[in-house]
Amino acid sequence: MFFATYEETLEWIHGTLRLGIKPGLSRMEKMLELLGNPETKTKWIHIAGTNGKGSTLTLMRSILEIEGYRIGTFTSPYIERFNERIAVNNIPVSDERIIELANRIFPIVEEVAKTDLGPPSEFEIITTMMFLNFAEYDEIDFGIIEVGLGGRLDSTNVLTPLISVITTIGLDHMEFLGNSIEEIAFEKGGIIKKGVPVVSGTTQPSVCKVLKEIADKNLTTIDFYGQTFESQKIR
């Protein structure tokens, strides 16, 4: 298949939504391997949490842009147009780029679908498009990536970032992440990588305990809001 128009490209991408949410990293890892592991070619900041992911991403992007860096972002969901999900300095990728990326990835998706791993989901396809775009089409200084669902088994959790950020944590997506805030914290904390420092806005003692245990197991540091750093409103 060859996609010639933006409309038919989106029809294919959104058509995979019927496959539903499919937690796990095996399909992502296979697709990225077949593409030469584009996720390893960019410096990342990874953000997970229940609330505040989008605003945290926006603030970090704005600060880094002011300092003169070229910043790629990956967000979900979009507000007006699909292209917003993949942007550089807050400018969404073009329709033509979406078509080009889809044509690059379609045969990979078909190949993986024929294996025991099964067909990739919509979010896995979009995430792979993002990694490929920043590796081969839009050169950036840093990429700021927002987790789609949870963290530990989220499609974005195939990268190794410079820093991991975990915003506030509440009871969300309990059908996938667990029945208690501690279980959900464990899933969100799954983005913590060995030796990669973590900053968190969580304040609940039980949540902080879960995240600190994960950080300790990964031999890394974690800073909590209200404990090791504060915020101040400047007029």
Image (cartoon, helix red, strand yellow):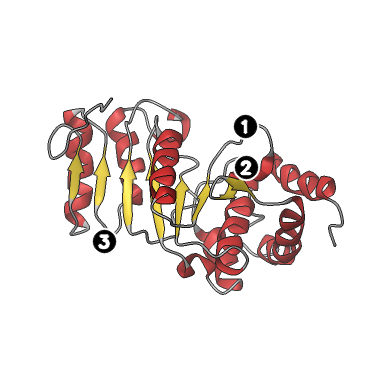
Indicate the position of residue 100 as horizontal and vertical percent values. Answer: 75, 61
* Alpha carbon separation for disc pair 3 and 2: 31 Å
Question: Mark 2: which secondary structure?
Answer: helix
Residue that appears at 12% across and 35% down: 227
Q: Does residue 145 appear to the left or right of 184 in the view shown?
A: right
Depicted 62 relative to depicted 124: above or below: above
Q: Residues within 10 Å of mark 2 (few under 14, many from 20)?
A: many
Q: Residues within 10 Å of mark 3 (few under 14, many from 20)?
A: some
Q: Residues within 10 Å of mark 1 (few under 14, many from 20)?
A: few
* Amino acid tagged 1: Ile
Q: Which residue is mark 2?
A: 84
Q: Reading the chain from its start, which is encountered first: label 3 or label 2?
A: 2
Disc 1 + disc 3, Cβ < 8 Å? no
* Amino acid tagged 3: Lys
Residue occupying the far left of the picture: 227
Q: Nearer the viewer, residue 189 or 115?
A: 189
Q: Reading the chain from its start, which is encountered first: label 1 or label 3?
A: 1
Q: Quadrant of the N terminus?
A: bottom right
Disc 1 + disc 2, Cβ < 8 Å? yes
Q: Nearer the viewer, residue 111 or 36?
A: 36
* Amino acid tagged 2: Glu
Q: Nearer the viewer, residue 51 or 89?
A: 89
**Residue 79: mark:** 1
* Alpha carbon separation for disc pair 1 and 3: 34 Å
Q: Reading the chain from its start, which is encountered first: label 1 or label 2?
A: 1
Residue occupying the far front of the picture: 235
Q: Quadrant of the C terminus?
A: top left
Q: Which residue is mark 3?
A: 194
Q: Does residue 14 appear to the left or right of 179 in the view shown?
A: right
